[in-house]
Amino acid sequence: MSEPIRLSKRVIELTGCSRREAELYIEGGWVTVNGVVIDEPQFKVLEHKVALLPNASPAPLASVTLLLNLPADMEANAVTLLSAASRWADDQTDIRPLKGHFTHLSSALPLQRQASGLLVFTQDWRTRRKLTDDAAKLEQEYVVEVAGTIAADGLERMRRGLRIKGQELPPAKVSWQNETHLRFPLKNPQPVQIVAMCEAVGLKVLSMKRIRIGGVPMGKLPAGQWRYLAAGERF
């Protein structure tokens, strides 16, 4: 062999499979080149040792959902943080990160404006539909750093439901986490709802972070890193 060829062609020669099956083997992370998994069918090989891992299957890559802890002021560039290098080292799933996991991702349930924290990116149409169709039912929890002195009845007013610029806001189970941080569990909040609620009772928002969507918490996921949604987790 004197000219490099595509890895997919070498897999065809090795297994006798079809071109599509060869691509599925490679994209599924089942093919090694000199002992290293390569998941790009167009990768060029020459005198390399190409092999299939045990239990290899030419099945389409399963759809995945990624949970990202977005740092402050990074919302416009969130997708740039999704790579194999930024996966959380303590991710408890046994999913192998593959190039195909970072394509055709869509986000759902945007953060409050200027907020950081939990963002969801998914390839799974069922997850996307759940987050879209059930947005009004899913509770989103934010931790909000505030400054100023809250009105004497401010907390109770937020719990009963505020009226802001002619709009009635539903009751909210707001509580103090500590002297400077409030917890806001809200269903389908408007883009600037938390800031408006705080200002209505004399508080200024310094920062806010979403820490949970439905039954899925962000937990100890570090800022700027992501993990896979585990099989048993449900929004």
Image (cartoon, rainbow, N blue to C red):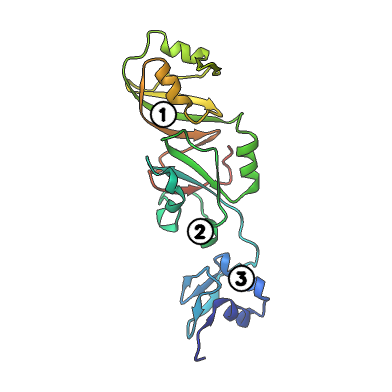
Disc 3 packing (10 Å; few <14; some 14–19; many ≥20): many
Farthest residue in the front direction?
165
Which residue matches tag 2?
A: 96
- What's the CA distance linking mark 2 and mark 3? 17 Å
Q: Which of the two residues, 51 or 226, is positioned nearer the viewer here?
A: 226
Where is residue 73, by image quadrant?
A: top left
Give the left or right position of residue 73, taking residue 96 as reference.
Answer: left
Residue 139: image x %, image y %?
55, 29
Amino acid marked by disc 1: Val
Q: Nearer the viewer, residue 29 or 108?
A: 108
Q: Which of the two residues, 96 or 112, is positioned nearer the viewer here?
A: 112
Q: Residue furthest top?
A: 152
SS at mark 1 in the image: strand
- Mark 2 and mark 3 lie on one chain; the one further toward the N terminus is 3
Residue 230 vertical placement versus 23 (above, below): above
Residue topped by disc 1:
143
Q: Quadrant of the C terminus?
A: top right
Determine whether 68 is above or below 15 in the image. above
Q: Which of label 2 and label 3 is nearer to you?
A: 3
Q: Which kind of residue does numbered mark 2 sit on?
A: Arg
Q: Of label 2 and label 1, which has the lower sequence position?
A: 2
Separation of marks 2 and 1 at Cα, in angstroms: 32 Å
The residue carrying pointer 1 sits among few (fewer than 14), some (14 to 19) or many (20 or more) residues within 10 Å by Cα, namely many
